[in-house]
Amino acid sequence: MKTIQFREAIQEAMSEEMRRDEAVYLMGEEVAEYNGAYKASKGMLDEFGPERVIDTPISELGFAGVGIGSAMTGNRPIIEFMTFNFSLVGIDQIINNAAKIRQMSGGQFNCPIVFRGPTASAGQLGATHSQAFESWYANCPGLKVVVPSNPKDAKGLLKSAIRDDDPVIFMESEQMYGDKGEVPEGEYTIPLGVADIRREGTDVTVVSFGKIIKEADKAADILAEEGISLEIIDLRTVKPLDYEAILKSVKKTNRLVVLEEAWPFGNVATEITYHVQANAFDYLDAPIAKINTADAPAPYSPVLFAEWLPDHEDVIKAVKKVMYK
């Protein structure tokens, strides 16, 4: 095992797949000459050249469409959005073309493309740069949605996403690019749609994904000192969702808390809550608790932002609530 940063894991995954398959290339704003807005493509232009590491104009709709057309004709593009907040400019291409072309063409075309970049909040960036769109894209049939939380998963999942024959939304975080973690030395992939039991426990199941799961880890450490054992499930893939792993855990702990960095209405936590009550109702010893951001745009003020974004204290309160403590 070696210890590398999250951004390095992303770079390794893309580079290894580009060496393995000449149909793979990277395109987006500042991915080439600048080595990526967050240095996730550092050195790739030097190795692969400007025909496979391509800087684009500031036109997400344009280069998303170019990538989709390219994927339909035999290539496997990786399209980087500087942030998924900017993907809204290109969402028509993603939803109405990438996600639907296999069905609309009667299987004559597929679209092996990865759209990747940071999602959700990244500190004091204001309302238009602090939005989580995982549930938006997961709502659309034909798209797979991946949200890794550590370098090992980022590399293994991205390699699987690049090899997938359908479009994948691969969502990262600006605040995780510098995170360090152990990554296997050799070739490996992680299958899409398989959750990870991040921490085994007996009292309460906590389901989360992406960078916010760190707050669940903090809560688990604090609660362990009080004799409360959390089982933490890292979804890794939001669509397809690993319902089986969640149900198995809930049937063991009989209590569920879902932590998500998204607005409270109609999100991933809502889907999980529905599925568990429909399929494991008799195992629940308490109502399911879900933790989300406040139902408001992200504030710019750091004081208000701290109130808006969930943290480990919110997890602790929710755990104690479902345990009637």
Image (cartoon, rainbow, N blue to C red):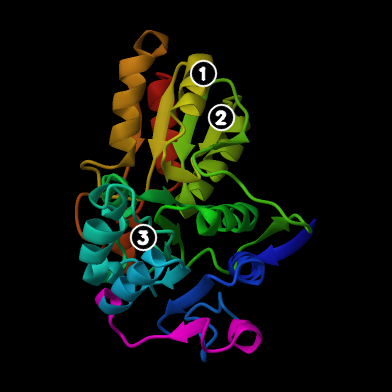
Q: 78 and 267: which one is in front?
A: 78
User: What are the residue bounds of the magenta stretch?
Assistant: 44-61
Q: 30 and 74: which one is in front?
A: 74
Q: Are marks 1 and 2 in contact (CB under 8 Å)?
A: yes
Q: Earlier in the sequence, mark 3 or mark 1?
A: 3
Residue 172 vertical position relative to residue 227 in the rendered view, above or below: below
What residue is at 40 percent from the left and 50 percent from the top? 145
The count of marks equals 3
Q: Which residue is identified by label 3?
A: 120
Of the 4 image quadrants, the one containing the C terminus is top left
Q: Residues within 10 Å of mark 3 (few under 14, many from 20)?
A: many
Tell me which corner region of the image, top left, top right, bottom left or bottom right, holds residue 197.
top right
Q: Earlier in the sequence, mark 3 or mark 2?
A: 3
What residue is at 51 percent from the left and 74 percent from the top? 25
Where residue 285 appears, as percent x and y from the top left, is: 40, 12
Task: Identify the amino acid type marked 3.
Answer: Ala
Q: Residues within 10 Å of mark 2 (few under 14, many from 20)?
A: many
Taking the image as shown, residue 37 lies to the left or right of residue 302, namely: right
Q: Earlier in the sequence, mark 1 or mark 2?
A: 2
Q: Which residue is identified by label 1?
A: 253
User: Can the viewer see residue 299 in this picture?
Assistant: no
Task: Identify the amino acid type marked 1.
Answer: Thr
Task: Identify the amino acid type marked 2.
Answer: Glu
What is the secondary structure assignment of the residue under circle 3? loop
- Residue 51 on the magenta segment: yes
Residue with the most extreme top position: 282
Where residue 150 appears, as percent x and y from the top left, is: 59, 54
Q: Which residue is identified by label 2?
A: 231
Of the 4 image quadrants, the one containing the N terminus is bottom right
Q: 209 and 308: which one is in front?
A: 209
User: Mark 3 to mark 2: distance in Å?
Assistant: 24 Å
What residue is at 32 percent from the left and 56 percent from the top? 132
